[in-house]
Image (spheres, rainbow, N blue to C red):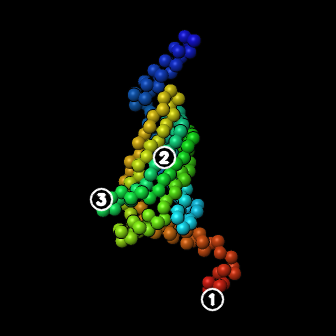
Amino acid sequence: MKSVKKLLLLAFAVCLAVGFSGCLEQPKIEVVGQKIQKVDADNTKIEIQVLVDNPNPIGISIDKISFDIYALVGGDKIYLGHGEQSNIKITSGNTTFTLPVTISNKKLVEVALKEKSTKIPIEIKGDIAVNLFITKVNIPIDIQQEIDVSAIAKEEVLNQLNNLNPNQIQSIAQ
């Protein structure tokens, strides 16, 4: 039992030393694509493809990523949607994973009308729960950026057109 405690203490000391020595580099995270999965009267479901370039020799486990998306309109925050994914394994090198996101169409249209633009400033707030084997760490997400919702509408129209059969196309053309 004492040897297990010593081993855990040694492992913890090594992790602290490596973590605080600057030997580990911060992974680079990039959104590499998005795909509309489903559009109905209430919501748009989008899958966002995320690429993580981890230059470190060890990977990490993300227990959960959870975030809310808000539109920033006239000093107000209007809830637009939510994204969440669990059990993500980030290896050394490149790892790609998918984040499912659900957006309220009603709120999105409401915000676009208030802004009188398809370009909407948004805020993404949430947490990333990282499992470091010895402990778990919550990393806050707080991102502000602008999105262009016309791209979502354009992609959905193109998808609908691609799914038409020849009879439907002929009836539209007449």
N-term mark: 3 or 1 = 3
Give how far across and how far down residue 24 sits, in percent.
44, 33
Along the polypeptide, which appears first: circle 2 or circle 1? 2
Is 58 situated left or right of 25 in this image? right
Q: Are marks 3 and 1 in contact (CB under 8 Å)?
A: no
Residue in the picture at 54% in, 58% down: 46
**Closest to the observer: 12 or 45?**
45
Residue where numbered disc 2 is placed: 66
Numbered label attached to residue 174 = 1
The residue that mark 3 highlights is: 75
- Across and down, in percent, residue 114 comes to 36, 69
Q: CA distance from mark 3 to mark 2?
A: 24 Å
**What kind of residue is marked 2?**
Ser
Quadrant containing the C terminus is bottom right
Residue at image position (52%, 19%) is: 8
Amino acid of disc 3:
Gly
Determine which quarter of the picture holds residue 123. Answer: bottom left
